[in-house]
Structure formats: C-alpha cells, structure tokens
Amino acid sequence: MAKPLDLPFDPIERAAERWEETWGPASAMRVATSIMRGQQILLARYDELLRPYGLTFARYEVLVLLRFSRYGALPLGRIGERLMVHPTSVTNSIDRLEKAGFVERRPNPRDGRGTLAAITAPGLDVVEGATADLMAADFGLGSLDEPSRTSLVDALRTLRIDARDFAG
C-alpha cells in the first residue's frame, strides 16, 4: 500500500494556489498532477497485492493479455503494441516471467525469425489468483462510486482519443 503522507493540507491544491499566483490558471496542472499521484498510489497498491505472486503490475498485464489471447501466445511485438509499452519493457517482462516459469518463448510458426511468448499452466494459475485478489480489493478504487468511475474513464478516454491511441 502507498505510504500515507498524512499531510495537514492538500499539496496539489497548495501548488495550484502558488501556480495561479505565479503563472495563471492551474486547472490543467491540477488534473495532470492528480493523475500522476493517483497512478503512484494505485501502482503501490497493486504491487503490494501482486508481490506474493512474484509479479509487478506490468508483468501481471502481460499475463492477462496472454490469458485473453486466442491461443495463449502472442508475438513480443504485438504484446508491446497492445500494452502500449516500449519493446525493451516487453523483453524485460518476458525474461522475468519466463524465469518464474509463467511464460515460455516459442518460435513463431508464421514468422521464422519471430518469437512468441506463451502462458504456461503455472502462469494461468498465478494470473487467476492475482486477479481474484485485485478484484477483491476493487482494484484499489473502492472509494470511488460507479458514476465517478464512469466519469473518470470518459474523461481519460477523451484524452486517449486526442493522443490517437485508437480511433474514437
């Protein structure tokens, strides 16, 4: 769990006040800083929940993607595209998951030079257990009601469409 700061004030609001005094409107800075702090809090929660499984959230995402794939295997490049991460990050995650016995590398039968990452039976077991724990913890979002979750997803979706993550 993220270490509670227990500050007597909201540092983002304090920064926004100073921002406005110095540079002008602070609404965009407040949103950006709040998103970044929220990510830190959630990743700390996820890493704590996933640690008993020998996973980080990044590695968990790879296992979920493989679990969702039609044949339990995907080319490494496709994993990077779907998770929107750099190829080096994919290689690092696959290396660690392979070392743990959760995935194995296989030659890609459709591309003689390519490699597939395939989820193993222990990988399937660990992704099921980890997912149950994350769901029981409501993905660390228990303090947000359903309308708040929907509004947040909608706002971030607009941001992602503007960045051309996908055709909206």
Image (spheres, rainbow, N blue to C red):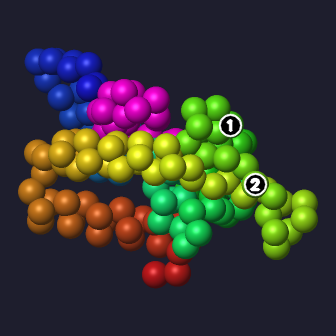
Front in this rendered view, residue 162 or 153: 153
Predominant SS of the magenta segment: helix
Q: Which residue is mark 1?
A: 95
**What secondary structure is found at the residue carrying circle 1?**
helix
Front in this rendered view, residue 17 or 75: 75
Where residue 22 sits: x, y (%)?
36, 33
Q: Which residue is mark 2?
A: 106
Where residue 32 sits: x, y (%)?
38, 46
Give the residue type at disc 2: Arg
Residue farthest to the right?
Answer: 112
Q: Which span of residues is magenta-colored? A: 38-59
Front in this rendered view, residue 143 or 168: 143
| Residue at horizontal 11 percent and vertical 18 percent from the top | 8
Q: Where's the N terminus, which quadrant?
A: top left
**What secondary structure is found at the residue carrying circle 2?**
strand
Where residue 30 sits: x, y (%)?
30, 43
Residue 46 is a magenta residue: yes
Q: Which mark is residue 167?
A: none
| Residue at horizontal 79 percent and vertical 64 percent from the top | 108
Is any atom of residue 63 visible in this view? yes
Residue 134 is a magenta residue: no
| Residue at horizontal 64 percent and vertical 32 percent from the top | 99
Front in this rendered view, residue 151 or 20: 151
Q: Quadrant of residue 34?
A: top left
Tag 1 and tag 2, C-beta contact below 8 Å: no
Give the residue type at disc 1: Asp
